[in-house]
């Protein structure tokens, strides 16, 4: 699989050496940077079409299984007497969606619809395919729930109106803030469901996790981490009244560990930033964990989406502190990602997102006449981040075993004078010594690459044959000007 440039690991950092009393640095990166690639946006890909969607629809989860895009969404009928449902749809390209007649729920006297179950019975937030489960539990889903307690007793059907009435009454009675918090509070729960096909679901009786008196008021995402052999979930959390991301895990689907913080705004971020939601998923062909965190900017009341990456799901970094899904040029007040990253065609990846025209804090831009819009954030394959030389640069990659085929580069050069040359070199050594090119594959023999290719083949005097190097540890040294390299494969 191609190696994408999502962090600095895999790039040789260089090391110092001393020779003849002179200090020097062995093959350091020069003139290159990691550059997040802002997504393009598709047209709106789904809108209400049926009576059970007349009050609006809200996609919650999407995945690609057996080459088919499958989506679960909240469908709300018109009028207060129509409860919202979780519905199901399928697509080949992410733009045209089929709503199959599943005959599972009755709506307006007919079962010829794509409704799965009432949202009030299970408020589905994420779905994943479990590679180690028996067939009857191959699909798994997670929802958030809560139990409200008033004066120590659970209130199963607490409404928002009743909650605010109780709060006003306590305030009028002279309760202190601490007394109000002890008299009226909720306990957050994560609940689960399993299915053989993503359509017929069995709700699990026991919660997956009781998070106590902490909030889950955002998009919470569960997955199976095959490398760790663990079920994991990324949840809304708080630290000193700032929003953060927490993680919980366990060997079973349920009975998970107490959630702990793994990602949040740090001192390199603007002081008014919070992480509103995780937007967690896996890189499409393995290796990396991704987040598309929704960054809430308190002073402007706006939300946009950045990119964070991890090798293990625990230690996270960001290639750049800039939006990968922005509010512009549409003029959204908020955008939130609902990933997986899925193939939309042979060259294009997409991550589902919602664009909302209102501000988070219901400021002057709020216009109830402008509906939320569901679109795809799109990139060409493996092009979330670029290793970029804005002018001219050079970088050596950490060695890898040559499989004896070809060296391919996913790259793009500027039309005016952009270029790339690739040479193969001996692995950098310790203690430091000059890094030598492998005979026949050096800079002098390297042919220029230019243009825009997903899998451009490097050649040396017209030949791409690496069979003579099969099984040998080699390093790649890239020389480039006004160019981006997104991934390499060898």
Image (spheres, rainbow, N blue to C red):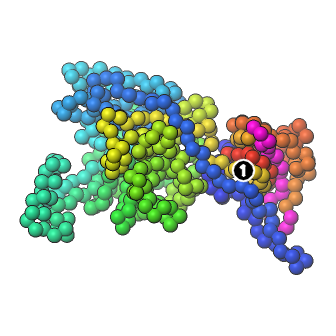
Residue 143 visible in the snapshot: yes
Q: Considering only vertical position in the picture, is 483 above or below 269?
A: above
**Residue at the spot 32% in from the left edge and 48% down from the top edge:** 362
Q: Which residues are magenta?
A: 415-434
Badge 1 marks a residue whose secondary structure is strand
Residue 316 located within the stretch drawn in magenta: no
**Residue at the spot 43% in from the left edge and 41% down from the top edge:** 332
Q: Considering only vertical position in the picture, is 83 above or below 277?
A: above
- Relative side of 46 to 25, left or right: left
Instruction: Tell me if mark 1 has few (under 14), some (14-19) or many (20+) residues whose alpha carbon lies within 10 angstroms of its own.
Output: some
Residue 426 located within the stretch drawn in magenta: yes
Count how many numbered circles sit on residues in the image: 1
**Residue at the spot 75% in from the left edge and 51% down from the top edge:** 391
Residue hosting label 1: 390
**Residue at the spot 21% in from the left edge and 22% down from the top edge:** 108
Residue 220 visible in the snapshot: no
- Relative side of 41 to 357, left or right: right
Residue 346 position within the rendered picture, expressed as x and y whole percent measured from the top left: 61, 30
Q: Main secondary structure of the magenta part?
A: loop
Quadrant in which residue 249 is drawn: bottom left
- Relative side of 482 to 425, left or right: left
């Amino acid at each position: 699989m191609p190696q994408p440039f999502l962090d600095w690991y895999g790039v040789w950092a260089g090391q110092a050496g001393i020779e003849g009393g002179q200090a020097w640095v062995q093959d350091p990166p020069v003139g290159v940077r990691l550059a997040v690639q802002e997504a393009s946006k598709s047209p709106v890909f789904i809108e209400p079409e049926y009576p059970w969607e007349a009050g609006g629809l809200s996609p919650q989860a999407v995945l690609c299984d057996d080459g088919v895009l499958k989506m679960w969404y909240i469908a709300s009928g018109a009028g207060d007497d129509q409860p919202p449902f979780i519905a199901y749809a399928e697509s080949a390209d992410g733009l045209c969606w089929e709503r199959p007649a599943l005959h599972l729920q009755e709506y307006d006297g007919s079962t010829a619809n794509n409704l799965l179950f009432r949202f009030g019975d299970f408020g589905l937030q994420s779905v994943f395919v479990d590679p180690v489960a028996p067939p009857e539990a191959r699909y798994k889903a997670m929802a958030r729930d809560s139990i409200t307690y008033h004066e120590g007793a659970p209130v199963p059907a607490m409404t928002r109106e009743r909650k605010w009435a109780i709060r006003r009454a306590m305030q009028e009675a002279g309760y202190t803030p601490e007394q109000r918090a002890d008299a009226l509070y909720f306990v957050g729960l994560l609940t689960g469901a399993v299915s053989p096909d993503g359509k017929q679901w069995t709700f699990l009786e026991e919660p997956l996790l009781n998070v106590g008196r902490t909030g889950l008021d955002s998009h919470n995402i569960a997955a199976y981490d095959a490398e760790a052999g663990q079920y994991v979930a990324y949840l809304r959390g708080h630290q000193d009244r700032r929003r953060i991301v927490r993680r919980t895990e366990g060997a079973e689907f349920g009975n998970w560990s107490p959630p702990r913080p793994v990602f949040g705004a740090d001192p390199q971020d603007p002081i008014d930033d919070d992480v509103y939601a995780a937007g967690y998923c896996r890189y499409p062909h393995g290796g990396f964990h991704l987040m598309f965190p929704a960054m809430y900017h308190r002073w402007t009341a706006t939300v946009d989406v950045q990119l964070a990456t991890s090798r293990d799901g625990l230690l996270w970094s960001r290639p750049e502190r800039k939006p990968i899904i922005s509010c512009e040029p549409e003029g959204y007040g908020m955008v939130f990602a609902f990933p997986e990253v899925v193939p939309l065609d042979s060259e294009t990846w997409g991550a589902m997102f919602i664009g909302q025209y209102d501000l988070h804090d219901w400021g002057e831009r709020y216009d109830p006449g402008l509906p939320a819009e569901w679109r795809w954030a799109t990139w060409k394959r493996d092009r979330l981040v670029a290793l970029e030389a804005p002018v001219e640069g050079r970088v050596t990659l950490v060695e890898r075993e040559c499989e004896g085929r070809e060296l391919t580069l996913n790259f793009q050069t500027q039309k005016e004078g952009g270029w790339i040359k690739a040479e193969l070199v001996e692995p950098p050594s310790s203690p430091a010594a000059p890094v030598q090119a492998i005979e026949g594959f050096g800079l002098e023999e390297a042919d220029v690459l230019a243009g825009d290719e997903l899998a451009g083949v490097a050649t040396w005097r017209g030949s791409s044959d690496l069979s003579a190097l099969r099984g040998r540890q080699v390093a790649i040294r890239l020389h480039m000007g006004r160019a981006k390299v997104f991934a390499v494969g060898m």
